[in-house]
Image: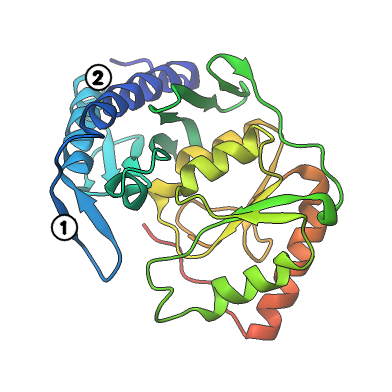
Amino acid sequence: MSDESPATLRRIAEEGARLAGKVLSERFLGERTIEYKGGIDLVTDADRAAEAAVLGFIRQRYPGHAILAEESGASQGSGLRWVVDPLDGTTNYAHRVPHFCVSVGVEGPGGVLAGAIYNPMLDELFSAARGEGATLNGRSLKASGCTELSHALLCTGFPYDVHQKPEGPMGLLRRFIVRAQGIRRTGSAALDLAYVAAGRFDGFFEFGLKPWDVAAGSLLVQEAGGAMVCIDGAPFQVGVGDVLACAPGLASALIAESKGFLADLGWTPPAPRA
């Protein structure tokens, strides 16, 4: 396939996400193999099966493209790169909590061009193409109109090294929890970003994310009119895993609070990942 327009890439991302989501939903109540990649970082047989399905689909259509996937890592190619998380929310999935998704994004030299996030348990397909807006099951999305932090429902998550380095995530959580209306922790960063794009959450912040967690979701937020930045307010980069996303009317307040906390902590920005 030679068509690399954002609209076509979006369609391929949607179809690939649905294909992987079907694998996950079919295996959800069955027996599964669970392994640990780290202290609290899981991988299941469903992660691997879903990844095989979506990567096979992408390679059939764009055999020359590069791929970065959570379980199999990076494969070289020319031109564009697909960034895939076959199961975001693996801990939820392993415990049979029905809140997880497939995230498929594709990026070029100028950033993310298209992406899709699919929750198979609710049959909700969030997708976006650069310059063409974001949708949920075909309906246009718009970020929240919230402008007051005290009225905002925020969401967050914790990195896998939170036991060893709790100061950043727990400190920023403490700072926001006394200023916002409420904070939720759902266990899927990709869905959190999709929910910000849909106006369900007013803001999201998290440390230590990987490119496959944020590639598709970042474009959704931007195309829905939301703000997507690094956690210190710097311009967003897919390879920087400390992020903040929010309704446009909250950006100034959230960035100011985050920057104030980070300054007190003596935090320095991490180097971007490949």
Q: Compared to 126, does 68 lie above or below?
A: below
The crowding category of the residue bearing disc 2, from other C-alpha atoms within 10 Å (few below 14, some 14 to 19, many at least 20), is few
Q: For mark 1, what is the residue?
A: 35
Q: For mark 2, what is the residue?
A: 61
Of residues 24 and 51, the one drawn nearer to the viewer in this rendering = 24
> Would you identify the image quadrant in which residue 45 lies?
top left
Q: Position of residue 168 (x, y in %)?
A: 56, 76
Of residues 196 and 56, the one drawn nearer to the viewer in this rendering = 196
Q: Compared to 43, does 170 lie above or below?
A: below
Of residues 44 and 272, the one drawn nearer to the viewer in this rendering = 44
In the image, taking residue 147 as reference, residue 206 lies left or right, namely left
Could you tell me which residue is drawn at 59 percent across and 80 percent down? 267
Question: As shown in the figure, which amino acid type bears the numbered disc 1?
Answer: Glu
Q: Position of residue 125 (x, y in %)?
A: 47, 23
Q: Compared to 147, does 220 lie above or below?
A: above
Residue 218 appears in view = no
**Element class at badge 2:** helix
Callout in the foreground (2, 1)? 1
Q: Position of residue 116 (x, y in %)?
A: 45, 29
Q: Position of residue 156 (x, y in %)?
A: 57, 57
Of residues 142 and 31, the one drawn nearer to the viewer in this rendering = 31
The crowding category of the residue bearing disc 1, from other C-alpha atoms within 10 Å (few below 14, some 14 to 19, many at least 20), is few
> Would you identify the image quadrant in which residue 133 lies?
top right
